Amino acid sequence: MIELSHVYKSYPGPVHALRDFCLKIDRGEFVFLVGPSGAGKTTLFKLISAFDKPTTGYVKVGNKRIDQISIGEVPYLRRKIGVVFQDFKLLRDRTVSENVALPLQIIGERDSIIKNRVREVLDQVGLKYKEEYYPEQMSGGEQQRVAIARALVHRPGILIADEPTGNLDPELSQEIMNLLERVHAQGTTLFVATHDKGIIEKTNRRVISLREGSLERDGIEFSETNV
Ligand SMILES: Nc1ncnc2c1ncn2[C@@H]1O[C@H](COP(=O)(O)OP(=O)(O)OP(=O)(O)O)[C@@H](O)[C@H]1O
Ligand SMILES: [Mg+2]
């Protein structure tokens, strides 16, 4: 479902954000991504969601080479992937429902369908009664759930979440994780970056650790030193 082969990503400097990185994730997996700040986690997510291209190596989602994708094909890829960004990226001047509706508007969905689906997904994340709020009227945890609702609204097969529990208290973090578990149980492939070792220890799932752009570990066994 997701495959990266010998991927390097360099930025001017030069900074080698990813070095000779290889990875395969199958349909239906739930995989955590860990690594210290600057290890390359967000860089990896940007390559998978076509917000950036590798310097060398290839990136595949489904059977599609993302590193060779044309601008015109990007919307088709985005239908398959939902992304929860590290900094939410909610639009301040739009309400919760307007923010969540965006991915469906971009693909030209009918207004009546958008309305129903936005309600449904807001209900799923527990924000049914905050449809008309603006992001700044909501707590960090609520904004995080809006970002998750927006990433799920078009029913993507893959959900990528970049530190979805960052800056949340343990109770709220657990709530977000329960939500992601439910999304996974419905058949979505999940790839989730986190610094939260408590959460990883509890779930017993595959953990990929990055260090200075390279794969350090890949497996179910997990040690504290990797986070
Ligand atoms: N646009 C960019 N231009 C130059 N360097 C960049 C750019 N984006 C990332 N980097 C560098 O690439 C490296 C990896 O950054 P990245 O954001 O992927 O780390 P991260 O693992 O997500 O860290 P964090 O846990 O703090 O979010 C860092 O050294 C960073 O400074
Ligand atoms: Mg990051």
Image (tube, rainbow, N blue to C red):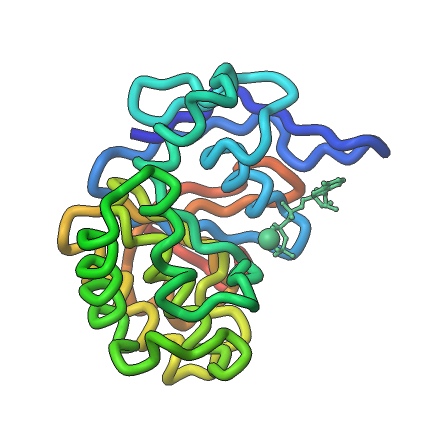
Give whichever of 16, 53 is nearer the camera: 53
The answer to whether 177 appears left or right of 212 in the picture is left
With respect to residue 2, does 137 lie above or below? below
Q: Give the x, y percent position of residue 183.
A: 22, 57
Q: Nearer the viewer, residue 27 or 199?
A: 27
Q: Tell me the residue at 25%/52% (across/down).
A: 111
Q: Is residue 207 visible?
A: no
Q: Residue at x 20, y 42 (%)?
A: 28
Any part of residue 128 in sight: yes
Residue drawn at 44 percent across, 55 percent down:
84
Which part of the image, by quadrant, shows the N terminus? top left
Q: Residue furthest front?
A: 111
* Residue 105 drawn at (x, y percent): 35, 46
Looking at the image, residue 211 sits to the left or right of residue 118; the answer is: right
Between 52 and 132, the residue placed more toward the observer is 132
The residue under the point 21% across, 68% down is: 124
Residue 162 placed where, x, y %?
Answer: 49, 55
Q: Which residue lies most toward the right here?
A: 13
Q: Is residue 25 above or below residue 67?
A: below
Residue 201 position, x and y percent, is 35, 66
On screen, residue 190 versus residue 41, left or right, reads: left
* Quadrant of the rendered image containing residue 203: bottom left
